[in-house]
Image: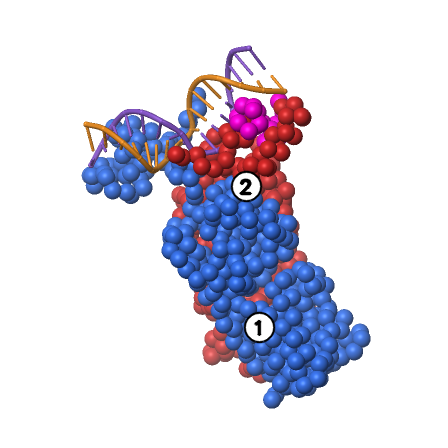
Chain colours: A blue, B red, C purple, D orange
Amino acid sequence: MRRSSVGIREVAEAAKVSMMTVSRAIRGVEGVSEKKRAEILRIAKKLNYVPNSNARSLAVENSNLVGISLPTFANDVFAEILAGMRGTFEGAGYASVIDTTEYSPESEQRWVERLLTWRPAAVILTGIDHLPDVGQKLRSAGIPTLEIWDVTADPIDICVGIDHEAAGYELGRYAVTLGYQSPAYVGAPIGRDRRADARLRGIKRAFDEGPCSHPIRVAGRPERHAFGAGAAGIDELLQESRPDVVFFLNDHMAFGGMMACGRHGLRIPQDIGVVGFNALDLTTVLPVPITTAKTPRRQMGVVGARNLLARIHGVATERTTTLPITLIAGETTRGE
Amino acid sequence: MRRSSVGIREVAEAAKVSMMTVSRAIRGVEGVSEKKRAEILRIAKKLNYVPNSNARSLAVENSNLVGISLPTFANDVFAEILAGMRGTFEGAGYASVIDTTEYSPESEQRWVERLLTWRPAAVILTGIDHLPDVGQKLRSAGIPTLEIWDVTADPIDICVGIDHEAAGYELGRYAVTLGYQSPAYVGAPIGRDRRADARLRGIKRAFDEGPCSHPIRVAGRPERHAFGAGAAGIDELLQESRPDVVFFLNDHMAFGGMMACGRHGLRIPQDIGVVGFNALDLTTVLPVPITTAKTPRRQMGVVGARNLLARIHGVATERTTTLPITLIAGETTRGE
DNA sequence: CTGTTAGCGCCTTCAG
DNA sequence: CTGAAGGCGCTAACAG
């Protein structure tokens, strides 16, 4: 008494053809006369036939699912990277299964294990730091894998992103050039966000290489949200002393920090300089343009998806693609 | 020469038991001695056994996937609703397949059709307005369905959300009480976002019922992002004349609008009142608290997921759950 | 162009 | 507690 729903068997019976003909008609492959195909599709529709992807995937031994792992949804950056990728994938007939890890490597590993049970056509991970098992499993399963947002010379499979350390360095250099001497950084706790850590390293290096080396003070706790975290970071720094320039993990934190500066009576950039990251939408409406670095989020998604599609189809592509960033000299830092 | 990968058959051979015993051991169901179970799990791990969800879903005729349809990722509101739901679902062992519709009903319909091929355990849609086919297909497939963020007395299955019309009315009433007389609204083009449209209706009704009825001017084009759209809306309104209060689709648009007001030399609230919606994180760091309405996004997700889980398990729940909003009397509108 | 055969990997059912 | 038989819906491979 199983078989309640309608499958290609029911359609085949109704159309008085074999299941294979129905299968071919529905998939749109060659080998069915146009007349029959039309008739079959008509009947399938009438019968409310719904294909069963599980059966199909089982038979063809893979699926049209792309598994994606993101740190969080609560960040425009990932939303934009995602948007960039999805357009390309949709067009190619893939659906995405997404999970967020909240920056936990263990969580990422569990998700990848889970993903593999679905025999995805490809997997996309954020960043290049993963538990060792992750890359190993993906490789041995032979699944095309894209690491996005950060780059390495030795990706699991392919990667597309920006060089965060270099980006930090560029921002740091710029600040050094402007003559800043007591820098501070407000971000997440070290170890939580590897890309942010890399940028901080770049900033540090810039100041180390400056005319005279300046230590950089670091603040940052895991906060509810970016705006609040930026504000809290400034509060924390000011308890001790006033830095002359503060680098923030991103523009939203920078904005929160600027608001906090206002509360403390500090003028920007006269009393304190502010540097953000990403050039997020928010910055376009502010009366004072923030000094920041523009990151090609959407483009990254597009390029990543395109390369990954190529990999799925067995075409060789660049293993590592590094996209450029653009320094934006705003007015939240002193003039040159 | 098929059967390259290791399945329960290979594990069974290695453990010298039947496939059924392996199946039971792995699923953790009763009927296997603890000794054997441990041994089987050990061997499975050694062999790098990866379960095949497609086969499992085919056999049991449903999956542990929950299909989700969101208008967009580029909006904190949906990110938070999602976060609220995911915690609950993860815990229960479900994975989510997500797609965004960019506010297109046709796109939503295609996605639902696609989802159904995966035999999902449940489906979650945003809002209560769908093409007729959507509800019909979901119902006839007997899939538990949650409509979230908006409510109706007649959901496809169950719904959890807020009453947007009432929310708009409440904000409108408040403005009427404060004596505002030439209101304007900045949002998306009518028809694009049904919830926003409902709120606008509520605002209108409040002004219609006021001491003397005041027409409300409406501005809004589909813009790249919320901040810019808010600013553009103000620019558009001011070309004609200055309203005394402007309602925005959400706080981010309101902020963009406030920045634009600054550009035009308008003081808030002396020259123009500003009302937002949602009480987004951004508002917590602004020096001037925005008049807005706090919406229970996270809670909505949690309650929705919980009710949906109940439905999946066949437990009866409320069909419609309406959550309350909280009016926040900020300082972007004149005092009472 | 159309049909037949034999699985895909796992689980339900029923028999020991 | 364990195993054998058969099926889930679909498709590759091979006939005609």
Residue B289 placement: quadrant: bottom right
| Residue picked out by circle 2 | B158
Tell me which amino acid carries mark 1. Answer: Ala
Q: How many marks?
A: 2
Q: Give the range drawn in magenta.
A: B13-31
Q: Which chain carries label 1?
A: A
Q: Is residue B55 left or right of residue B329?
A: left
Q: Residue at image x 25%, y 42%?
A: A30
B268 with respect to B191 (left or right): right
Residue A3 covered by magenta stretch: no
Residue B40 position in % (x across, y down) = 60, 30
Most foreground residue, B277 or B51? B51
The residue where tag 1 is placed is A166
| Quadrant into which the N terminus of chain B falls | top left
Kindly report the distance in space between the C-alpha atoms of the residues bearing marks 2 and 1. 51 Å
Depicted B83 relative to depicted B17: above or below: below
Q: What kind of residue is marked 2?
A: Ile
